[in-house]
Image: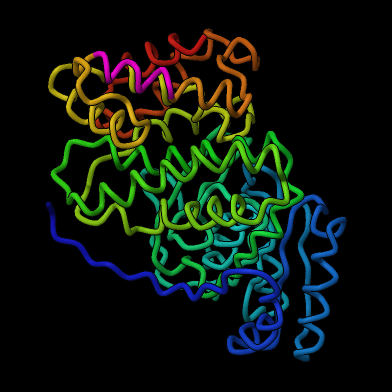
Amino acid sequence: MNNFVYDIPTKVYFGKDQLSNLGSELKSFGNRVLLTYGGGSIKRMGLYDKVVEEIRKAGLELFELSGIEPNPRIGSVREGVRICKTEKIDVVLAVGGGSTLDAAKFMCAGAHVDHDPWEFFGANAKPIETALPLVTILTLSATGSEMDTAGVISNPETEDKLGRLAGPIRPRVSFLDPTLTYSVNAYQTACGSADILSHLMEVYFDTEQGMDMIDGFMEGMLRAVIKYAPIAIAEPENYEARANLMWASSWAINGFIACGRQCDWSCHPMEHELSATYDITHGLGLAILTPRWLEYCLDEVRLPRYVQFGVNVFGIDKNLEPMEIAKESIKRLSDFFFKDLGLKSNFTEIGIKAEDFAMMAAKACRDGNINGFKTLSAADVEKIYEMCL
């Protein structure tokens, strides 16, 4: 196990009716607030009015940027940066799911530099040393952006979808009210749950020596998502189900489970090329890729990890032959994604074409190989894509 530094400074208000604290938290950072959100669902659900009321009660000056896209675009980030600079914004308030939160993170960073925010990304990425404070109100359990240092932005002009980690963009305060996810439809609940599972499995399936107690936390969160996602789909206003998904979303990717591990993620870079090229929902791409990736990586060296996963997460009989347990665990994960959650099971169903595989695989491996659970070259990534047809 490697040395690590653990620091999660995000203050979380979890549960119902916490927005009464919003005004005072925003005011602690200044008086000029930029509110960012997506396509208007927060207005339909009445959240927008509540947020504006709390901002007005605190005597703060409000500015707005709406229309943040799924798979957020660099154009929206640029517009947010422009507003922050022109209006001398003190704090950004992002209300929505991971796309809105990710875009807001780079607005906060971009407000403190003179260069274009796209220069934060890529092989010659410029540093993020400071950023405006970010406060978030989460409406979709999926990305974990409410407590992490990560964000992913798409550039339609270059067909790139690139991620970035930086401490200064971690939210200062996040409001996590499970009731705000009641209106999330079955499809987005399923995709969000697949995203949470992928965040956990990208760390769980690695080659580094870890700690049993961290494995236990991951297995517990995996079991919770597998238990509660179907309940949330069947009973959208089941508070226990929504709360479990929301808290698992945050802790799957806030740095806690990754302590001491340095293994690259594999499915995320492969999926980013799918959604960069085809603009599909991120969680759907991950659901299709993950079982095939596990199947492709399965060998005698990695077999014990599959056995642990199958026994401790899916409750498969530990007395079965190890390879049988491994294959059954992949089958059960596939059944969860495509039967229990009802997601499409292959690329053909969602219009992804084999003619783009070579290009997408090369971009997924733009820094060389993917040095994850199993080292993957561009040729390996192509083969995994082919398994998904």
Residue 18 or residue 289, whichever sits in front: 18
User: What percent of the width, then of the height, locates residue 113?
Assistant: 51, 68
As displayed, is residue 287 above or below residue 57?
Answer: above
Q: Main secondary structure of the magenta part?
A: helix
Please give the name of the residue rendered at 71% of the width and 59% of the height, measured from the top-left corner.
180
Q: Is residue 331 magenta?
A: yes
Please give the name of the residue rendered at 35% of the width and 23% of the height, measured from the top-left corner.
329
Residue 189 or residue 282, whichever sits in front: 189
Direction from residue 272 to residue 254 in the image, left or right: left
**What is the magenta range?**
324-332
Please give the name of the residue rendered at 81% of the width and 52% of the height, measured from the top-left corner.
41
Tell me if residue 152 can be seen. Answer: yes
Residue 181 or residue 234, whichever sits in front: 234
Query: Which picture quadrant has residue 95?
Result: bottom right
Query: Which picture quadrant has residue 134?
Result: bottom right
Q: Is residue 171 magenta?
A: no
Colour mode of the rendering = rainbow
User: What percent of the width, then of the height, locates residue 334?
Assistant: 47, 21
Tell me if residue 126 can be seen. Answer: no
User: What percent of the width, then of the height, locates residue 158?
Assistant: 56, 34
Please give the name of the residue rendered at 40% of the width and 61% of the height, measured from the top-left corner.
166
Residue 118 or residue 357, whichever sits in front: 357
Direction from residue 184 to residue 279 in the image, left or right: left
Direction from residue 179 to residue 347 in the image, left or right: left
